[in-house]
Amino acid sequence: MNIATLRKKAQGGLLEVEDLLQAAIEKQPGLSEELARLAMAYGWQTQGLQSNGSRVVPLAKWAAVASAYADSGFDGLRTQVKEPQDIPFVLGLAERIKSTDSVAFVLEVSAQYLRGKASGEIAAQIASAFNLLLSFKQAAPVSSAQAAAIQNFLVVVYPSLQAEAKRATCLLALRGVGDQSAIQFVEEAADFKEPWIDTKSVVLRAVRKRVKTYAL
């Protein structure tokens, strides 16, 4: 996603968040300067909820996150998570980067939550980020120590999640890190209703396979 394409999409009103994040991941030269120019030219907003009650995509906020990463990598993102309301935007980028650095970064954010420095609403978003990073093909590498820390986070926050979709996502994230104790935890969890009815069986199958593989 080069600068010329970004500019053309912005001119046509076709620019999407995914375009900004992809350009950031590619660390396109001059990205932060171009995004600042586009934000000014097209009046991008930093808040999704406007004063008149309408909602817009806060492209200016996404642009700030994209620029921070393009300029300074995860060090840049660390400056962005100082404000709790910005954490969802930062996670939206970090979860797309399947790397050891990204896993370490999201663990840092999870530690903020466990220390009470981020709201409970952030917990499910952190769990979702771990799920996307570690539970699918081309998963990010994770050390045994990181896996244990991630599992601990997921187990700790699970009881606080009210929505069934969020609880399901939290359990699904265990697929990439779960050990034998995770199997017992999932078995003891309450069953889910549709469309999440298969969550426990999916997680148990993946974790049992993981435990068996690491035991070989």
Image (cartoon, helix red, strand yellow):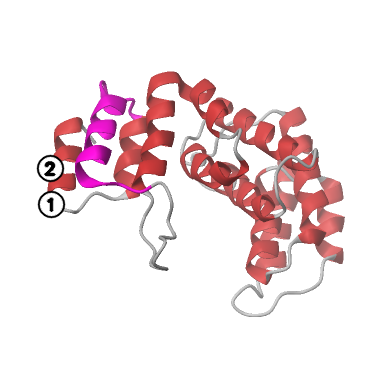
Q: State whether residue 200 is above or below residue 126.
A: below
Residue 139 at x, y percent in the picture: 54, 39
| Crowd tier of the residue under label 1, counting other residues whose Cα lies within 10 Å: few below 14, some 14–19, many 20 or above | few
Where are the magenta residues, as a range? 26-45
- Residue 8's label in the rendered image is 2
In this orientation, does residue 113 appear? yes
Nearer to us in this view, 160 or 38: 38
Q: Residue at x 38, y 67 (%)?
A: 54
- 116 displayed left or right of 72: right
Q: Amino acid at mark 1?
A: Gly
In this orientation, does residue 216 appear? no
- Residue 179's label in the rendered image is none
Nearer to us in this view, 10 or 136: 10
Q: CA distance from mark 1 to mark 2?
A: 6 Å
Residue behind mark 1: 12
Residue 87 at x, y percent in the picture: 57, 42
Which quadrant, please, contains the N terminus? top left
Which quadrant, please, contains the C terminus? top right
Tell me the chief SS of the magenta region.
helix
- 153 displayed left or right of 96: right
| Crowd tier of the residue under label 2, counting other residues whose Cα lies within 10 Å: few below 14, some 14–19, many 20 or above | few
Q: Amino acid at mark 2?
A: Lys
Q: Residue furthest bottom?
A: 194
Q: State whether residue 105 is above or below residue 129.
A: above
Q: Residue at x 20, y 32 (%)?
A: 2
Q: State whether residue 57 is above or below residue 74.
A: below
